[in-house]
Each structure stands twice: as C-alpha cells, then as structure tokens.
C-alpha cells in the first residue's frame, strides 16, 4: 500500500476535464509538505509536471494545474488530448518515514 | 543542458552482485541530491534513497535500508546503486533523478535490471 493514495484509473473524452486526487495524512501532505506531480508516458522515464503544489516547469502546458488542501492534493487536466494518455504520480515528503513518498499512480485513458 | 545518463540494461543470476551508474552533466554535480527510484514491472514508483555527492551524505527509505547501497564518485560526476546479492524480486527498472528542493526535476532514462536463473 502506498503512503499516498491515488485512484488506479480515470478516463475522459478528448476536450474534457479530468482530475486526479492524491490523499495523504498528517505526516505528509497534512503536515504542510509540498506535493509534486509526474507524468509517465508508456515506456519512458517520469517527467516533472507540477512542483510545489501548483507550479508548472517551463514547457508544461497550462492545461495542467495542481492544487492542495488539507491532507489531499489534486491534478487537473483540461482540454484532454490523446497525448495525455499516461500514468500520473503524486509525490511528497513523509516525516515519519524521513523521506520522499510516491502515490500508487493513476492511469489516464483518453476515450 | 542538464543530463543524467544511466548505464545499460543488466541480466544477472540470483546471488550475483551488481552496480549500476548514473552520470550527471551540464550542472555542478556536487550541489544537488541524486535520488534512486524503483519501478517493478507494471507497478508504480518507489523512492529508494538519495545521496548528496558533495559530502556523500546518504539517506535510505526504510524499505530499502540494508538491501542496497547508494554511493557517488564526485570526481567523475557519477552516482551508483549496488546490490551484493541479487534476488529475483530485484527485477525492475531503476531511475536516478536530480532533486531540486523537494521534487525530482530531471530523470535518467532508466536501467532495466533482470534477475533470473
């Protein structure tokens, strides 16, 4: 079981909006630690998508956005495109484990 | 341009030792933490540990403490992940990544390790 909980899968039609949740606890997200999001396209290394809850690295489209509240965080993708089909992971720091933790990952299917 | 280039795929037998590498370029190797992440076949990402090449300060995930050794040679800008006795359950893709603040901004291409008799 991952320390951070994500839905195993989400789906949406092209052009739609989807959200992916990431639920933690008082030792990670709830303790105020930032949440980061990664996109992993099939057969490739993960790529940083959102850092520090809501910041996009250069080159990431503004269709991707992040937010955090309490012990949870969310990744939103608007204007879904076929190329967005990938696995998405959240990551934070956990004080009880004294290290980084990842969510279990969410597979996004574009219908 | 920041780059992390990992060593090639490995096929090993149970009980054998292995050391894989991650060479950084395009930045000051000694001033950023390098982390290692495991991805077992069809599974998610697992944080294994990190090292600060400047002084070799190393931290391990409790799940991997004692199972692997993380090291670095700053003279050649290279970080390492090693096993003394591989198990079939070590079969996975292993990624190195450069840590910036609390996130991993740059990733290596991955090294596939297959352990099979």
Image (cartoon, coloured by chain):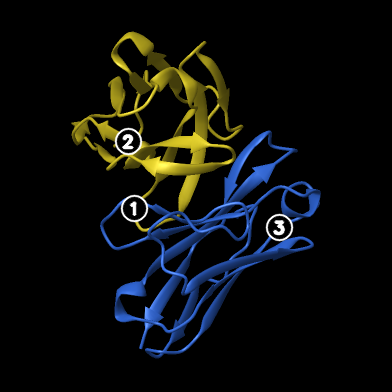
For residue B35, above or below residue A65: above
Q: Residue at x 23, y 37 (%)?
A: B116
Chain holding disc 3: A
Q: Given contact means CB atoms under 8 Å apart, are the residues at marks 1 and 2 in contact?
A: no
Q: Position of residue A93 (x, y in %)?
A: 65, 43
> In blue, which chain?
A
Chain holding disc 2: B
Question: Mark 3 and mark 1: span between their CA atoms?
Answer: 25 Å
Q: Residue at x 45, y 17 (%)?
A: B53
Q: Nearer the viewer, mark 3 or mark 1?
A: 3
Q: Position of residue B74 (x, y in %)?
A: 37, 12
Q: What colour has chain B?
A: yellow
* Discs 1 and 2 lie in a common subunit: yes
Q: Secondary structure at mark 2?
A: loop
Which residue in the protein does label 1 denote? B41
The image quadrant of residue A72 is bottom right
Question: Mark 1 and mark 2: span between their CA atoms?
Answer: 28 Å
Q: Along the horizontal axis of the image, is A100 left or right of A15?
A: right
Frontmost residue, B10 versus A109:
A109
* Discs 2 and 3 lie in a common subunit: no
Q: Secondary structure at mark 3?
A: loop
Which residue in the protein does label 3 denote? A24
For residue A13, above or below residue B14: below
Q: Along the horizontal axis of the image, is B92 left or right of B69?
A: left
Q: Position of residue B21 (x, y in %)?
A: 29, 25
Q: Secondary structure at mark 1?
A: loop
Query: Which label's residue is closer to the chain start, 1 or 2?
Result: 2
The image quadrant of residue A59 is bottom left
Which residue in the protein does label 2 denote? B2
Q: Quadrant of the C terminus of chain A?
A: bottom left
Frontmost residue, B100 versus A99:
B100
As drawn, the residue found furthest toward the front would be A58
């Amino acid at each position: 079981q991952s320390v951070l909980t994500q839905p195993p899968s989400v789906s949406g039609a092209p052009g739609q909006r989807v959200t992916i949740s990431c639920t933690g606890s008082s030792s990670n997200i709830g303790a105020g630690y930032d949440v980061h999001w990664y996109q992993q396209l099939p057969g490739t290394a993960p790529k940083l998508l959102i850092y520090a809850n809501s910041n996009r690295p250069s080159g990431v489209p503004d269709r991707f956005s992040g937010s955090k509240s309490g012990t949870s965080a969310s990744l939103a993708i608007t204007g879904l495109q076929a190329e967005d089909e990938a696995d998405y992971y959240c990551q934070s720091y956990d004080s009880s484990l004294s290290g980084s933790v990842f969510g279990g990952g969410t597979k996004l299917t574009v219908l | 341009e920041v780059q992390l280039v990992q060593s090639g795929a490995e096929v090993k037998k149970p009980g054998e030792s292995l050391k894989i590498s991650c060479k950084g370029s395009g930045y000051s190797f000694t001033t950023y933490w390098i982390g290692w992440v495991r991805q077992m076949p069809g599974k998610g990402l697992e944080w294994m540990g990190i090292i600060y090449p400047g002084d070799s300060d190393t931290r391990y995930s409790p799940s991997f403490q004692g199972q692997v050794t993380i090291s670095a040679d700053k003279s050649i800008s290279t970080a390492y992940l090693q096993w003394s006795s591989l198990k079939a359950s070590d079969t996975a893709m292993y990624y190195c990544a450069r840590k910036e603040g609390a996130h991993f901004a740059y990733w290596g291409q991955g090294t596939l390790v297959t352990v099979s008799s």
